Image (cartoon, rainbow, N blue to C red):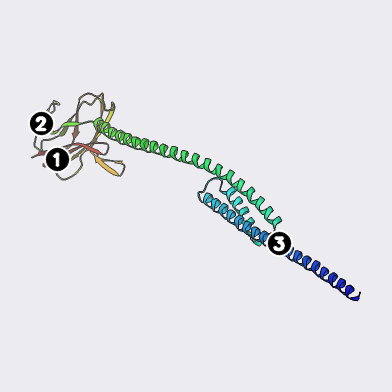
């Protein structure tokens, strides 16, 4: 009877130990499964964190490239890039739990969507700028061609003006001077003797010129004797930086036709030798000749 009781107790203990063993095995299995699951979660979260950081880095690179193109949207692009940089810094400091990663991924998707929109706008602006550049280049070519054409026209006009100016100048020909003796009757006798000369007669012809300006023409006549003295009025006039001492002036009514001009310069005690006669149109010498008295 006692042996039966002992066997019964032993069986009970064995049964209890079996139950405890099974329970322990189940607990250990659960712990192991939870640990594996936790490790899987940690690994997955870490991988997601690295993936999001990589994607954010790619976003930043895209913004940097777009900003470098100096578009009119640079300020907006810089602001969005700064948001990406801040999110990267926040993500690096985070513990990377599931809730945090969910929040960061949502923020990344929002930034990615914003970037796509901005990049589309940048692309449109780039195309417009390229068209504007092409149009500007074409305009510059047209302007440059017009500038060259205008320069040619200016050159031609200047040459034409010079030609007209040159052609419009009057030509003096047949400048001759002779000495005359005045008789009491008023008759003049040409002489080449200084002692007999009472007056010098200066003659010249203004040639016909259809394009010259008509009207009064004033000429300054300068007669220089053999002793280098200016005869006559000995008046002085200035043209710009040039001073001219002349013997007399003659005013001619010019009507674009040939005109013969004759003027006389009275004097006394004319010196022997060679005389020089110069005719000036303002400060410009337009004709000259010489003659001699013996």
113 shown above or below 97: above
Marks 3 and 1 sit apart, C-alpha to C-alpha, by 138 Å
Marks 3 and 2 sit apart, C-alpha to C-alpha, by 150 Å
Numbered disc 1: secondary structure: strand
193 vs 241, nearest the viewer: 241
- Closer to the eye: label 3 or 1: 3
Circle number at residue 190: 2
Marks 3 and 2: CB-CB under 8 Å? no
Which residue corresponds to mark 3? 33
Which residue corresponds to mark 1? 275
What residue is drawn where x is 16% and y is 40%?
A: 276
- Closer to the eye: label 2 or 1: 1
247 vs 8, nearest the viewer: 8
Q: Which is nearer the N-term, disc 3 or disc 1?
A: 3
Res 250 quadrant in image: top left
Res 161 quadrant in image: top left
């Amino acid at each position: 009877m006692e042996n039966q009781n002992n066997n019964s107790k032993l069986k009970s203990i064995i049964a209890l130990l079996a139950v405890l063993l099974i329970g322990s095995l189940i607990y250990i299995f659960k712990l192991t499964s939870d640990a594996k699951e936790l490790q899987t979660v940690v690994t997955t979260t870490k991988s997601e964190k690295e993936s999001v950081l990589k994607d954010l880095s790619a976003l930043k690179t895209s913004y940097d490239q777009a900003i470098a193109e100096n578009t009119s949207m640079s300020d907006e692009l810089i602001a969005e890039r700064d948001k990406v940089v801040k999110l990267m810094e926040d993500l690096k400091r985070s513990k990377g739990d599931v809730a945090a990663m969910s929040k960061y991924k949502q923020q990344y998707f929002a930034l990615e969507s914003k970037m796509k929109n901005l990049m589309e706008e940048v692309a449109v602006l780039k195309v417009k700028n390229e068209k504007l550049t092409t149009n500007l280049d074409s305009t510059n070519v047209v302007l440059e061609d017009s500038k060259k054409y205008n320069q040619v026209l200016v050159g031609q006009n200047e040459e034409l003006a010079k030609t007209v100016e040159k052609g419009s100048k009057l030509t003096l020909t047949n400048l001759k001077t002779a000495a005359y003796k005045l008789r009491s009757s008023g008759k003049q006798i040409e002489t080449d003797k200084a002692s007999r000369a009472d007056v010098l007669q200066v003659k010249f012809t203004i040639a016909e010129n259809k394009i010259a300006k008509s009207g009064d023409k004033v000429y300054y006549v300068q007669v220089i004797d053999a002793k280098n003295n200016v005869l006559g009025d000995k008046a002085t006039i200035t043209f710009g930086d040039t001073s001219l001492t002349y013997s007399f002036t003659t005013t001619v009514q010019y009507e674009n036709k040939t005109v013969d001009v004759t003027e006389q310069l009275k004097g006394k005690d004319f010196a022997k030798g060679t005389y020089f006669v110069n005719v000036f149109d303002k400060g410009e010498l337009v004709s000259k000749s010489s003659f001699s008295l013996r």
